Amino acid sequence: MNGRWMGVVAGVAAAVMVACGPGARAEPQHGIAMYGDPALPQDFVSLPYVNPDAPKGGRIVFGEAGGFDSLHPFILKGTAPYGISVYVFETLMGRNWDEPFSLYGLLAESVEVPDDRSWVEFTLRPEARFSDGTPVTVDDVIWSFETLGTLGHPRYHALQDQITSMEQTGERSVRITFEGGNRELALLAGLRPILPRAQWEGRAFDESGFDVVPVGSGPYVIDAFEPGRFISLKRNPDWWARDLPLMRGQHNFDEIRYDYFGDGDVVFEAFKAGEITSYREGNAQRWATQYDFPRVTSGEVVQSIIPHQRPSGITGYVMNTRRPAFQDWRVREAMIQAFNFEFINQTLNGGTLPRITSYFSNSVLGMGPGPATGTVLDYMTPHQAVLLPGAIDGYTLPVSDGTERNRAGIARALDLMAEAGWTVQDGVMRNAGGQDFTFEILLNQGATETQQTMEIYAAALGRMGITPRITTVDSAQYVARTDAFDFDMAYYTRGVSLSPGTEQRLYWGTLAAETPGSRNWMGVQSPAIDGLIDAMLAAGSRDDFIAATQALDRVLTSGRYVIPIWFSDHSRIAHDRRLRFPDRLPMYGDWIGFQPDVWWYQE
């Protein structure tokens, strides 16, 4: 193990060094915010959107399309159930989902940072325990950071690459020092999962499978599982954090169970039959027309609308620019022009859902209409030479007449293809060398709606002399292929928060483009995107942060990497009437931390 991570500074000498070092006037706090101070006071009783008196008991059963082949959620190999990482393990700090980005002590009782946030120091709670009863130690923290940052999934590597040292500064405290220029790193360190080092002694951390049943410090333990069919998480009655103000009113079910099915349609049928107890509906038309089955009409099932204030994110069909077919932006624009959003939205959703117009649309972080001005323009000007048309002067998605033919869109798409060197010859789109233009669309077999969408899209492309290959694979193959960027076009969704940060590099940064398992499926390598992410992370004020993010949004959207589809400013959850949630909803709505975290069971 690299010695620089395991250096230990203890005793009086360490205390003197810390007190005399940079940022010595920093003081331990109960929480930290990206900008300003956290909203909740030190003596807060519970989060504002929980029911602190929620009863404990009962269970909630989810249905998942696909399967799992591992219990290890922290590595690239294999597919592990979602619930393991979030309910079996804990982080040093936890989020309040009613603020853009604020953290409060969880495993750590306090956090300390200097004004420039060049380092962060956490002091662990003495009562923090793993589910096997062993204490959470500084050694576990340092080992977890190093192991996840080197052997873990690539999503953990970016933070580790920006850490210059870690040292124990007291019996329960650890200081992490960063490379300069990124105010968010202190918060990201607070969200790093902490694992028990002892469980992995003598074992290969980066091996997938079922040989190791992971132990964490979280509210649940793995109770039972059958590979690919179900996994049951049981609430730990001895959970050390059950009385913490941050956790009060949360994690109330005795059991969280995930059942796995062949595809999304089977999951819905299982919900109708009562085999699962909660179902998140993504299709507005089905929500309006197909919830008249007996369990609904009898009142056994309740339909709940959950509004939110988060950005749209990006959802649609991503084009892999690593492949020759999509390296020309004019081809990508042609694919967008040929996608008849209005007709598809009407066919599948009754025309009720608005279109995603940019990566951060539906929020203050989204790009404005028309040309860039003011600080946004200032951020973009240094990169002007590499920006695509529409970045500075404004970019809007095409709007069809709503008919299936979409004549104007197809005509514009043909013009763009011709500009890129592709024309229709004998009914087939070819280049001057006689090479056919075709590509593969990769879909997950459990995604019925995406298959319906692509069937309509393929028919439109056929009118341009293009015949795409639609390949449907199971969830394990889908993950493996997308992790390896082995696709031309694929369904793609990335949620973004009200406080985007370092994860943006993993989503669309240059280094991530060649890192298997990263979120940069489109393969974009742009100095403008890299520079604007850096500007966003280094922003010293909320106003500058917003302007930098709006500039980034313009460059991403005008890059034409994704064919955007729809979003909703609310979510739809149908559930057993005995499953309850608080009246007061968080800013982020039904996002991470909502279901099942703040729900409870009540007869």
Image (spheres, rainbow, N blue to C red):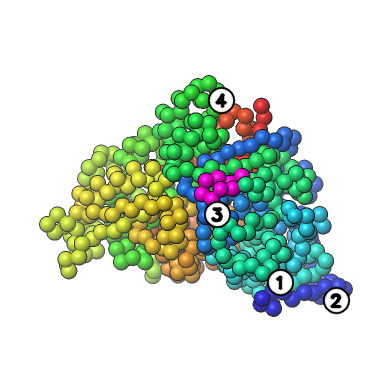
The earlier-in-sequence mark between 2 and 1 is 2
Left or right of 352: which side holds 343? Answer: left
Q: Mark 4 or mark 1, which has the lower sequence index? A: 1
Decide whether residue 334 is among the magenta residues.
no
Pick whichever, 61 or 142, lies toward us.
61
Name which of mark 2 and mark 4 comes first in the sequence: 2
- Contact between labelled residues 2 and 3, with CB atoms less than 8 Å apart: no
Distance Cα–Cα, label 4 vs label 1: 53 Å
Residue 583: percent from left, percent from top: 64, 32
How much space separates mark 2 and mark 1, taking CA atoms? 16 Å
Q: Are marks 4 and 3 in contact (CB under 8 Å)?
A: no
- Of the residues under marks 3 and 1, which one precedes in the sequence? 3
Residue on which the image places disc 2 = 13
Q: Position of residue 481 (x, y in %)?
A: 41, 60
* Circle 3: element type: loop
Q: Earlier in the sequence, mark 4 or mark 3?
A: 3
Q: Residue 166, which numbered label?
A: 1
- Residue at numbered disc 3: 80
Amino acid type, label 2:
Ala
Asked if the stretch drawn in magenta spans residue 228, the answer is yes
- Residue at 28%, 39% in the rendered image: 402
Q: Element at badge 1?
A: strand
Query: Helix, strand, or loop for circle 4?
Result: loop
- CB of mark 3 within 8 Å of CB of mark 1? no
At 48% from the left and 68% from the top, the residue drawn is: 515
Residue 380 is at least partly visible in this image: no
Of residue 437 and residue 268, the one placed in the foreground of this image is 268
Q: Position of residue 283 (x, y in %)?
A: 43, 37
